[in-house]
Image (tube, rainbow, N blue to C red):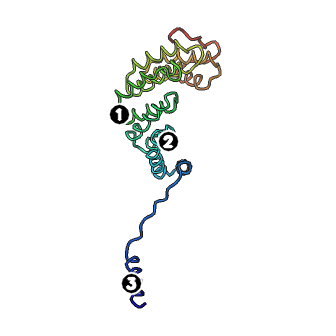
Amino acid sequence: MRRFALLFASICLLTACQPAEKVKQTFALNELQNHAGFAESQGDDARAIELWTEFVERRPHDAMARFRLGSVLLRTGDPQGASENLWVAHDLKPGRIDYLETLAESLHQSGQRDTLFQLLRDTRNEGGLAEGHMRYATYAKRTGLIDEAEESLRIAVALEGTRSDKPHRMLAALARQTGDEEAEIDAWRTVLWFNTADPEANQRLRDLGVIPGPSLARPPLNGG
């Protein structure tokens, strides 16, 4: 009996001397998604990345998880890591314009210029051809490709210029960037054709020394 007591005491002592093993909490996938979303909503990006990464490891072909992880990585300054996940999300759900636009932004921020413009050319039809050209123009303008940006916007105007003021606004912004006041005035006049009370158009025309009014509105011309 005494020998058994000593043996038991020795086992207990040895066990007590060993470091406690860290136990990792494992969530079910739906719980993992909820916890990751909550971390995002609280601004805890590090925790969100940790949880979305685990989700992706367990379910690598989940487009939503790839998109959420990529979005947090992009927001926290890792556009390269973001693009790797956003590519998967876009490939899985090519019809999701938010996936496409976030992928494009990650490629732009990570300096993958050739890949970005190839993507923009390949996806011009996604979300409508006019939108595709405006998407291309956005990044062409941001990278200093002014002629390409204008050409894409002229195409967008030809496609949708009588239904939407968006390409005309973008032409105005481009003209302002290049210092072409005459082209900018023309673009804002067309914006007024859609809404003569448009506050942005009227204020900018005043800044340019033009007195706005209903008679200044100009209907869209073919190609702007």
Query: In which quadrant of the rendered view does residue 189 lie?
Result: top right
Residue 182 visible, this angle: no
As shown in the figure, which amino acid type bears the numbered disc 3? Leu
Q: Residue at x 49, y 49 (%)?
A: 48
The mark nearer the N terminus, 1 or 2, is: 2
Look at discs 2 and 3 and give the one toward the viewer. 3
Instruction: Give residue 7's mark.
Output: 3
Q: Which residue occupies the foreground of this view, 114 or 199?
A: 114
The mark nearer the N terminus, 2 or 3, is: 3
Q: Secondary structure at mark 1?
A: loop
Q: Residue furthest top?
A: 222
As shown in the figure, which amino acid type bears the numbered disc 2? Ala
Residues under labels 1 and 2: Cα distance? 24 Å
Q: Which residue occupies the foreground of this view, 150 or 16?
A: 16
Q: Residue furthest front?
A: 1
Q: Which residue is mark 2?
A: 65
Q: Secondary structure at mark 2?
A: helix
Instruction: Give residue 51's mark.
Output: none
Look at discs 3 and 1 and give the one toward the viewer. 3
Compared with 193, 19 (above or below) is: below
Query: In which quadrant of the rendered view does residue 107 lie?
Result: top left
Instruction: Give residue 111's mark.
Output: 1
Look at discs 1 and 2 and give the one toward the viewer. 2
The percent position of residue 119, horizontal first and vertical second, equals 41, 26
Q: Residue at x 47, y 24 (%)?
A: 135
Query: In which quadrant of the rendered view does residue 188 lie?
Result: top right
The percent position of residue 178, horizontal first and vertical second, equals 42, 21
Q: Which residue occupies the foreground of this view, 207 or 56?
A: 56
Mark 3 crowd level (few <14, some 14–19, many ≥20, 10 Å Cα)? few
Badge 1 vs badge 2, beta-carbon distance below 8 Å:
no
Mark 2 crowd level (few <14, some 14–19, many ≥20, 10 Å Cα)? many
Residues under labels 3 and 1: Cα distance? 66 Å
